[in-house]
Amino acid sequence: MELFALFISIFSMMQLVSTGAVGKCSTACAERNHGKIVRVFLKGEKVMVGVCKNNTVDPRPGHRSLVFPLTCNRFVGVWSFDFEDEEGIRPFSVNCPPNKGVPQSMLDECPTLDQPTVADASEHLNKLNTNKIEE
């Protein structure tokens, strides 16, 4: 019985975190129903996350998913690619955890500065791969 109660309490905590926020930086606004946050770092005013997206561009073995770095000022709430952290883009040989998604109305409330989102990640990766091939 105690084990069941522990399971229920852990499950309910996971549900609360799934659409959480650090300051004004909403996890739903980072994932945008296209990826799943798999790592989080806090540094001063910045929230830095790695968003996993299943790979549809890179045909190499061991590249089933990619993690892209995004940053957000926790007092502003706008997510953007961390273009200075190319080393933060990592391939993985497993698929990403599922994204349960949020209603579009919630995404419509996300602050934006016309920055690329995780939905644009495949295009950004394609440009990186093209540049590496040409070098």
Image: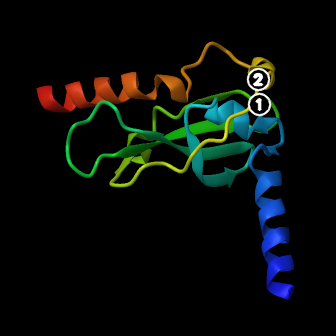
Q: Nearer the viewer, residue 41 or 95?
A: 95
Marks 2 and 1 in Cβ contact (< 8 Å): yes
Q: Disc 2 residue type?
A: Cys
Q: Disc 1 residue type?
A: Gly
Residue 17 point in image, percent of width and height: 78, 52
Label 2 neighbourhood size at 10 Å, few (<14), some (14-19), many (20+)?
some
Q: Which SS class for mark 2?
A: loop
Please give the residue where the numbered disc 1 appears in the rendered image: 77
Left or right, 18 with reference to 84:
right
Q: Nearer the viewer, residue 1 or 45?
A: 1
Whether residue 48 is visible, yes or no, is yes
The structure residue drawn at horizontal position 74% and vertical position 48%, both measured from the top left corner, is 18
Marks 2/1: CA–CA distance: 8 Å
Q: Which SS class for mark 1?
A: loop
Please give the residue where the numbered disc 2 appears in the rendered image: 110
Left or right, 105 with reference to 124:
right
Residue 109 point in image, percent of width and height: 81, 20
Q: Nearer the viewer, residue 51 or 78?
A: 51
Q: Residue furthest top?
A: 114
The structure residue drawn at horizontal position 54% and vertical position 51%, both measured from the top left corner, is 97
Reply above or below: 113 against 90: above
Quadrant containing the N terminus is: bottom right
Left or right, 115 with reference to 68:
right
Residue 29 point in image, percent of width and height: 70, 31
Residue 117 point in image, percent of width and height: 56, 25
The structure residue drawn at horizontal position 76% and vertical position 26%, both measured from the top left corner, is 103
Label 1 neighbourhood size at 10 Å, few (<14), some (14-19), many (20+)?
many
